[in-house]
Amino acid sequence: MSLRWWLRAPWDYVMMALGLSYWGFFGGLLTLIGGPLHLILPQNTGEKLGRMLLHQLFRKFVVLLRWSDLVHSDLTALDHLGKIDHPFIAAPNHTSLWDVVFIIARLPQAICVMKKPILMNPLLGGGARLAGYIANDGMTRMIRHASESLNRGGQLLLFPEGTRTRPEARWINPIKGGCAIIALHANVPVYPIFIRSNTRFLQKGWPLWRRPVFPIQIHFDLGEPLFVQPEETSQEFTERLAAVYEHELSKPHPLRRQIDSPVD
């Protein structure tokens, strides 16, 4: 490691602790108020309120990351996505645990498909339930709830890989079929999002306490919308979507994924 890496260590650890404290306080507060509101507010009102609160929570966290010099992120493409006024599926590759933070920070009415244990999490569960986030604990149920949310005008955030990209994967994990089926049922476009970074921080297997080389560089690009074509099966659409990721993520880029460097 370089001398600069060691000289930055005190600042980095303090800022990492501040970030965790941010989630502990505001995430816990949102759960405290979100749980009861989920039970008493009308569904549409509660969902809009919950999505707005999570949007602002994530947005302020991204500002904190920039201020602390922990992360340099280019979110220009996501700003464009947030201005789209029709329902759609935002479909990013899944590089790390905090991908969702940057995307929801730019999507004011995002609906997230997430693992059921996260909906029960004391730091985010109450807000996620209030916002109408969807558990992926059953394919049929998940597809129905996602399609209903899109039909009500939502912006669905769905990671087609289903989990974070494995360290040994070249560009991306195999794509699951749920994205295609939901797009077909709800008749909405899929916007691929391509995430690149200079680190494997918070990838699968990365301990939360392990400090990467800061500042982290993260770049987001937005692909052209993909529509399920007439007579196209969900499997064919999934293969077409996978080819788009492979083509884009394999392009020369300063932050292109390096398979032979699993950790910094």
Image (cartoon, rainbow, N blue to C red):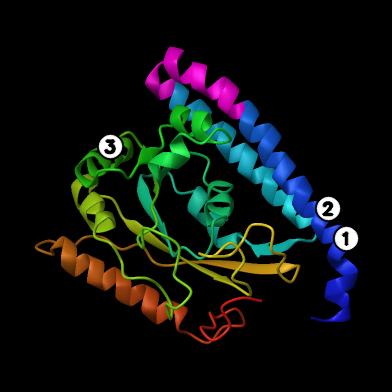
Snapshot quadrant of residue 99: bottom right
CB-based contact (under 8 Å), mark 3 and mark 1: no
* Mark count: 3
For this view, does 239 lie left or right of residue 17?
A: left
Contact between marks 2 and 1 (CB within 8 A): the answer is yes
**Label 1 crowding class (10 Å Cα cut-off): few <14, some 14-19, many 20+?**
few
Label 2 element class: helix
Does residue 42 belong to the magenta stretch? yes
Task: Kindly identify which residue carries mark 3.
Answer: 145
Judge depth for marks 3 and 1 and give the one in front. 1
Q: Is residue 68 left or right of residue 217?
A: right
Q: Position of residue 231 (x, y in %)?
A: 9, 63
Vertical side of 151 occupied by 69: above or below:
below
- Residue 38 position, x and y percent, is 45, 20
Magenta span covers which residues? Answer: 30-45
Quadrant containing the C terminus is bottom right
Q: Nearer the viewer, residue 139 or 49?
A: 139
Q: CA distance from mark 3 to mark 2?
A: 41 Å
The answer to whether residue 110 shows anywhere in this view is no
* x and y, in percent, of residue 184 in the image: 20, 52
**What amino acid type is highlighted by mark number 3?**
His
Query: What type is the residue that disc 2 sits on?
Result: Val
* Residue linked to disc 2: 14
Question: Which residue is identified by label 1?
Answer: 10
